[in-house]
Amino acid sequence: MRDYYEILGVERTVSEGDLKKSYRRLAMKYHPDRNPDDEEAEARFKECKEAYEILSDAQKRAAYDQFGHAGVQQGAAGGGAGAGFGDIFEDIFGDIFGGGRAGAGGQRAYRGSDLQYNLQLTLEEAVHGTEVEIRVPTMVICESCHGTGAESGSEPETCPTCHGAGQVRMQQGFFSVQQTCPNCHGNGKIISNPCKSCHGEGRVEEHKTLSVKVPAGVDNGDRIRLSGEGEAGVNNGPAGDLYVQIMVKPHDIFTRDGSNLQCEVPVSFTTAALGGELEVPTLDGKLKLKVPAETQTGKLFRMRGKGVKPVRGGMEGDLICRIVVETPVNLTKRQKELLQEFETSMKEGGHRHSPREHGWVDGVKSFFENLKF
């Protein structure tokens, strides 16, 4: 089975807009109406449609990117079963030619717009999962006219210009061009007595409250799709979808790297030199961390299974603690004297207590000795 991205001639990083443009171009090229009795063109058209149906859906695309055809096998379009070519053509090219499906009162119906809501979460909420209520401004079906746009007791009338087709044919020399009807704007109907609540739109703006279940393990950039919770369609067309975009707030202690969590652990000079035991925070509570003697800044300690369990499955990550040896500040006179005595004792006896420092000094000395002027 061919790769879906290859079928549509796009890269894996393609944007939604460019994906749609490529599909439109190929669907126009191979559409059966343009290639009558051409079985190869019909097969290519079905192939393109299947690829677009998968890649245009955020969840299906993610599954396909991770698992290939096996990840979307049950949800694949199967070559367009259950939809006629006329319906497909209207869905894809409706906004170009002014098409759509018949809706309320025989008017042309159009799918509502998709919406996006940016949801900010704490790291704890993203890792453990949560359920939140969001309030979204959207367009909903007008209750007064039930989406027809006509005042109660009246109905939309058939457009006298296009006779309900929503399109008119213009003759230009030898060519005949079909375009959106200028009188009804593609609806096929004229509303003489518009609804007072929606002013003939069939939709009104409202705020609606939705409950969103956030699965454990989500990260920045993940999207949750709420099917049918976008804007209501025009003339009782199908509603769009709502995409909840996850945005995780910066944390005071932890940073996230995939399924792992990272944090810096400040350690006193004495503890780093002599060793000791510290309390380290995790998202599930506190743990003891044994710091061995002579620990240096940058030393990493890994706490298995104390990271994040990925939202798409897999092993739980780790918590990685990076030691940072802290230089004491605000010293008293006596403390400074003790440090001077300590420094003097470190130089006695010829012992190298700071191997990295001595190694660096030796390297610098060798560099200047070998330097040619």
Image (tube, rainbow, N blue to C red):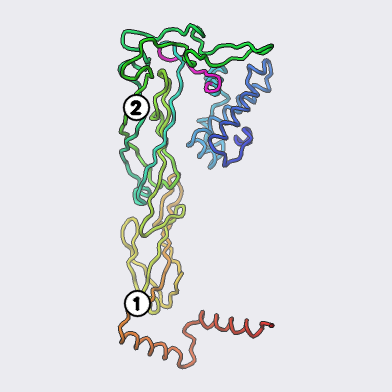
Report the magenta residues as a range: 94-104
- Residue 165 at x, y = what percent? 51, 10
Q: Which residue is mark 1?
A: 329
Q: Which residue is mark 2?
A: 205
Q: Is residue 228 left or right of residue 76?
A: left
Q: Residues within 10 Å of mark 2 (few under 14, many from 20)?
A: some
Q: Residue furthest bottom?
A: 349
Whether tag 1 and tag 2 are in contact, CB under 8 A, the answer is no
Q: Nearer the viewer, mark 1 or mark 2?
A: 2
- Determine if residue 1 is in view: no
| Residue 215 location, quadrant | top left
- Residue 305 at x, y = what percent? 41, 56
Secondary structure beneath dot 1 equals loop
The answer to whether 34 is drawn above or below residue 8 in the figure is: above
Q: Residues within 10 Å of mark 1 (few under 14, many from 20)?
A: few
- Residue 302 at x, y = what percent? 43, 63
Q: CA distance from mark 1 to mark 2?
A: 60 Å
Query: What's the mark number on residue 226?
Result: none
The answer to whether 67 is drawn above or below residue 336 in the figure is: above
Q: Quadrant of the N terminus?
A: top right
Query: Mark 1 is on which residue type?
Result: Val
Secondary structure beneath dot 2 equals strand
Count of numbered badges drawn on the protein:
2
Q: Is residue 93 left or right of residue 43?
A: left
The answer to whether 339 is drawn above or below residue 143 in the figure is: below
Q: Residue at x 38, y 88 (%)?
A: 340
Q: Is residue 96 magenta?
A: yes
Q: Residue at x 35, y 25 (%)?
A: 140
Q: Is residue 153 magenta?
A: no
Q: Residue at x 35, y 85 (%)?
A: 336
- Residue 262 at x, y = what percent? 42, 60
